[in-house]
Amino acid sequence: MNPEAIRDKVAIVGMGCCKFGENWDKSPEDMIVEAAFEAYEDAGIENPQEQIEAVFCGAVYPNKGTAEVADALKLFGRPVSMVTNYCATGTDAFRYGVFSVACGMYDTVLVVGFDKPKDRGVSGPSAVTTGVRGLPMTPAGWFSLCAAKYFETYGAGREDLAKIAVKNHHNGTLAPKSMLKREITVEDALKAPIISWPFGLYDCCAQSDGAAVAVITKRELAKRFRDDYVLVKAVAIALAPNPQSDPSFDFLRWKPTVYAAQQAYAQAGIANPFKEIDIAQVHDCFTLTELLTYEDLGLCEKGSAKDHIASGTFALDGELPVNTDGGLKTFGHPTGATGVRMLYENYKQLQGKADKRQVKNATVALSHNIGGAPQTCGMTIIGMP
C-alpha cells in the first residue's frame, strides 16, 4: 500500500448544505437540490449536466437509492453509485469520489450525503435487548457502560461531559444551518432527565434530516473553479472487531478510531496531531464519544481529556477547537449526511468563511465518524495548498 497515493491530488472546489432539522416540509430530493445548487454556485458550475462526470452518494435510509439523486439533479447518462457504511457513510462516499479523481478516471465529480430518518417514524435506531455478555445494545445503553468504566478508571464525572454539551450548544448557536440553537449551562445539563446514566438529555444527539454536497476535481484543474480551493490530504476507513464480542475490548477506547487515525495520519504525513491539526469535527453522538475521541485520535494523552476540557483546549477559542459548528449535538444525525456536513464546516473554516465561529489561522482540519457496534470509523484530513 502507498499511504501517500492520494495526498494533495484532489481539491474541493465547491460545497453546499441544507438546513438540518425535522424537515417535515421537504422531501429527500428537496434537500439534495438545495445542497447541490449551493455547491454548484460555490464552485461556479453553470452546466452540471456537462461538468459533473460521476456521482457518489451516501445514505442509510434512501427511498429509491441512486435514483433519488439522479432524478433530483437530472444527472443522467453517467455513473451514480451509493455506499452505506454505518455512521461513516458520508465519509466513505467522499472516499470513493476522491479515489475516482485521484486515479485519473474522472476530472470532476459530485459527492452527495443525505438521509431523512424522521420519515421512518422512530426517534432512533431500533432497540436490541440481547447481546454477548448480556450487555444492552441500544446506543445510549452501550455508550453509557463505557462512560461508567471511564469515570471509575480516570476519575472523570458527569460535569466533565456536561462541559462538552455546553461547548457544542454554544457553537451551534453560531452555525446558521444547525437544528438546535439554545445556549445551556452545566447546571442545565446535570439537571436534565436521565436517558441512560450517566447520560442526561443534553449528553445525547438527536436524529434529524439533512443533505450536504461536495464538488471535487483534480488539483491541476482547481484554479479554473476558484483560488481558495482546499486539498484532500487523507481519507480513511477502518473496521475493528465487534466490541460486544471482542475479549480484549477494555471499554476505554474505540479501536476503529485508533485504526483509522493510523491510516489517515500516514496518508497526510502527520506525526503530532495536536500540533499539526488546527480544527476537528468529531462524532459526538454522545458527549462521552467526543471525550474518548480526543484521546483515541491522539489529541491528548489517555486519561487527560477532563483536564483539557477544564482548561478549554477544545473550545472555539482554545488551542484545538473541536466541533466548531456544534457537531451532531446541534445538527442532529441524518446518518448519510453527517460526514459530508463535517467537511462543509472544515471547508468553510479553512477558507476563512465561518463568520462568528471562525477559528484564526486554521490550515489543516480533521473530520471523524464512528458507527455500527461501533465497528467502523471514517476520517478525512483536508488542508490549504
Image: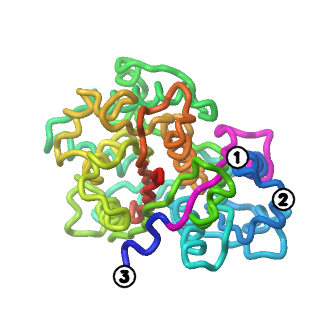
User: What distance separates the C-alpha of mark 3 from that of mark 1?
Assistant: 35 Å
| Place of residue 379 in the rendered image (x, y in percent of width and height, measured from the top left) | 43, 59
In the image, the segment drawn in magenta is 9-32
The image shows residue 99, relative to residue 282, as above or below, that is below
- At label 1, counting other C-alpha atoms closer than 10 Å, the crowd grade (few under 14, some 14-19, many 20 or more) is some
Q: How is the image coloured?
A: rainbow
Q: Where residue 1 is drawn, which disc sits there?
A: 3
Residue beneath label 1, please? 42
Q: Can residue 26 be seen in this view?
A: yes
Q: Nearer the viewer, residue 51 or 39?
A: 51
Q: Which of 343 and 124 is in front in this view?
A: 343
Q: Residue at x 56, y 38 (%)?
A: 331
Specify the amino acid type for callout 2. Answer: Asn
Specify the amino acid type for callout 3. Answer: Met
Mark 3 or mark 1, whichever is nearer to me: 1
Specify the amino acid type for callout 1. Answer: Asp
Q: Is mark 2 on a helix, strand or loop?
A: loop
Q: Which of 273 and 130 is in front in this view?
A: 273
Q: Is residue 158 visible?
A: no
